Image (cartoon, helix red, strand yellow):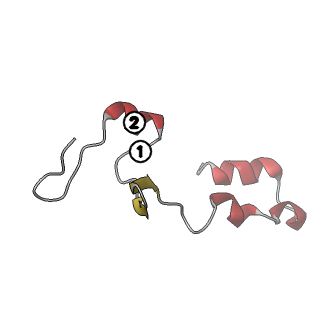
Amino acid sequence: MKISERGQITIPKKIRTRYGLGPNTEVEFIPEESGVRIQKRRSGRHPIRDYVGLLGKGKDVDAIIEDMRGR
């Protein structure tokens, strides 16, 4: 693999599939002594965090799950 003149690289499909690197996936470059590690950027907030504590507020469990699924 080579870096293009514009600083781009192509990640092989087998690796993209294995690690869930789809279009618009944010990655970060982590310098290490032996080179650079590329990993998925972790979001600052877990998607479940918005739903913690809702069950005690009288919401139906099925309604919460449907809301989480975007239905």
Give the numbered dot on residue 15: 2
On the rendered structure, is 16 left or right of 49?
left
Q: Which tag, 2 or 1, sits closer to the chain's start?
A: 2
* Residue 30: percent from left, percent from top: 43, 62
User: Which residue matches tag 1?
Assistant: 21
Q: Secondary structure at mark 1?
A: loop
Seen at 23% across and 49% down, the residue is 9
Circle 2/circle 1 CB separation < 8 Å: yes
Question: At which x and y percent is residue 35?
Answer: 37, 56
Quarter that holds the N terminus: top left
Against 48, residue 21 (above or below) is above
- Rate crowding at label 2 as few (under 14), some (14 to 19) or many (20 or more) other CA atoms within 10 Å: few
- Nearer the observer, 45 or 42: 42
Which is in the foreground here, disc 2 or disc 1? 2
Give me the residue at 81% from left, 50% from top: 61
Q: Residue furthest front?
A: 33
Q: Secondary structure at mark 2?
A: helix
Q: Nearer the viewer, residue 24 or 71?
A: 24
Residue 7, image quadrant: bottom left
Tell me which amino acid carries mark 2: Ile
Residue found 39% across the figure and 61% down from its top:
29
| Cα distance between the residues tagged 2 and 1 | 8 Å
How many neighbours does mark 1 have within 10 angstroms: few (below 14), some (14-19), or many (20 or more)? some
Find residue 32 and report its horizontal and vertical position in percent.
44, 60
